Structures are given as C-alpha cells and as structure tokens.
Image: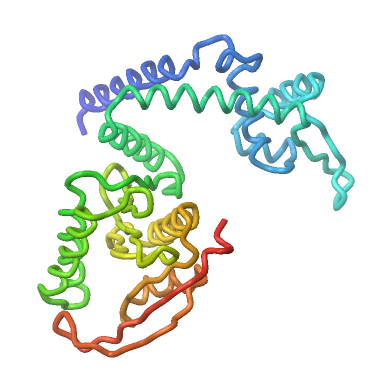
Amino acid sequence: MSRTEIDRRIAVVRRFNRFYTQQIGILHESLLDSRFSLTEGRIVYELAQIDETTAGELARQLGLDAGYLSRILRRLRQGGLVERTQSTADARRMHLSLTAAGRRAYAAINKRSYGEIGAMLKAIAPSEQNRLVGAMASIENLLGEGRTDDAIVLRSHMPGDSGWVISRHAALYAEEYGWDGTFEALVATIAADFIETNDPARERCWIAELDGAPMGSVMVVAKSKTVAKLRLLLVEPRARGLGIGRRLVIECLRFAKRVGYRRMTLWTNSNLDAARHIYERLDFDLTDEKPHLSFGHDLVGETWERSLADVP
C-alpha cells in the first residue's frame, strides 16, 4: 500500500472521529447535562452492570490508569454514589458497588441517553437505521476483540425480505441436503400466506442482520388461539456459531408469550441437527415422529413443543 493511500485512510478515520465525538457530545463539559464527566459516567455505567467489582478489575476493563481511577472513585464515594465493602472470601480485597443514590443517578443518565439516541435514530428512515447500526457493528468487530451478540441486529420483516427468505432456503437446502424444487415451493407458499393473512398483533417475522446484511430468519404464526407455530428458521453458513439461531428462537418464545399464547410448536426433520440442537437446549420436547417422502428424499418429520409458562 502506498504512503499516499495510508495518509488518505488516516485522514478519513480522523475526520470520522471528529464528527462522531461532536455528534454524541463528548466535547461537552458534562455527560448528558449531568454532574458527571464522560469518564465518571462510564464508571457509573460499568458499576451498574455488575453487583460488585474491584478497582483493579475496573481499571483493566476500562484501560484507565490506576491512580486516575482512584481519584475519580474517591470523588464518587464522597458524593455518596459508590461504596466499598470488604470481600468475605479475601479480607485484602475491597469490592466496589453503586449505592442506592448511585443507581438513581445511573437511571437518570441512562434514560437521558436512551432518549437522545432514540431521537437521533427517529430522524432517519428504518432502512437507514439498519445501515447505521450495521456499520457501527462492523467498526466494533474490526477494532475490537471479535463478534459479540451485540453485533447481531434482529428486526421486523420489511417489503423485499420474503424474496430473500425463499431464495436462501431453496439454495441452502439444495446445497446442503440435496432437496429439490418442491421445498422452494413450500417455503414460497408459507411466505405468501404470511404476507397475505398475517395478524400483526399475534404473528411476526424477524430478519437477523450482521454488518447490515441478512443472515437469518424465523417467523411465528398462529396455529390456534393458544398455540403458536415457529416456522422458517434459517441461519447463513458464514454466520453460524454466533448464536443467531438461538437468538431468533428466543425472540419467538418471548413474543409468543407476550401476546398471549400458552404453547409453541414446530415441525422439522430429523436430519437438521443444528436446528434440533437449538430446540433441545431451549426445552422443546419431541412429541411426534413420522417418516415421509418429500423434497426428493425419504425423511423423518418431527414435531417439537414446549410450554411458554416459564419463558421470561
């Protein structure tokens, strides 16, 4: 790579840094018009996510100088926001945690941050919001320590998604299992029925995105007033192992319980090991098995079910 190209890329990154620090208010004297500096706010945020930690662990997590962190923690303790308690396991260790006043202060800045970011997103179209979040996930993944659940975005079905769902099901199942065009026809029928007849209050389709690109799908439809049916679970090969399938199924379970279903059912085939593993780990029970000739192959169809009573 030429020196000119390196200089150009450095200039682009610096320009983005200047833009984004201004966009999120880092240059302001206080964080979100609170009494906290940016660093103090970040420390309060980290302490709010855990029950207790030590100053050493906090310094390593945030990459802060121990002396600098100690001075900030002293101010937060003097303000009644942070407290230190002696470890019951090791008397030499002092644990840090937020006081009740500290948690109230955190709740206030967290609510303000949520509102400001919500307002920023509301100003752009939903499709552009997906591009923005995907680009942010890409930056985090490239500069961080690898992909996390936060890099995966689940969004509701939008016009054009059904074509992708049908195409990817047909192509992947033909490539991985040798299924013929009758499977594509089945998926197309399910997708068309969903578009034409779905009840938005009780039926839903989700698309999982990674770096702004679709990587998975699933839907919930009504089997009866009390039983929901999970359909068309798919995860792209290059995105497998990231927990996308599990995230999609959990989203289905939570939605189904929230809108009043009591049970969830699904139909799959015995050779779809990855999907069956997800269902087993999420407490579905295999309730029925039947051999059938479909999609050009002898298969064993399976019905799996679970109660929604214990879904959080």
Residue 52 horizontal side relative to residue 234, left or right: right
* 100 is higher (above) or lower (below) than 177: above
How many labels were placed on the picture?
0
| Foreground pick, 157 / 72 | 157
The answer to which quarter of the image holds residue 34 is: top right
Work out which quarter of the rendered image holds the C terminus and state it.
Answer: bottom right
Image x and y of residue 148, in percent: 45, 49
| Foreground pick, 142 / 162 | 162
Residue reaching furthest left?
181
Image x and y of residue 89, in percent: 85, 53
Q: Residue at x 21, y 34 (%)?
A: 1
Residue reaching furthest front?
225
* 217 is higher (above) or lower (below) than 210: below
Q: Residue at x 43, y 27 (%)?
A: 118
* 306 is higher (above) or lower (below) than 225: below
Image x and y of residue 67, in percent: 72, 25
Q: Residue at x 12, y 74 (%)?
A: 182
| Foreground pick, 229 / 232 | 229
Image x and y of residue 150, in percent: 45, 44
Q: Residue at x 56, y 26 (%)?
A: 111
The answer to which quarter of the image holds residue 142 is: top left
| Foreground pick, 256 / 175 | 256
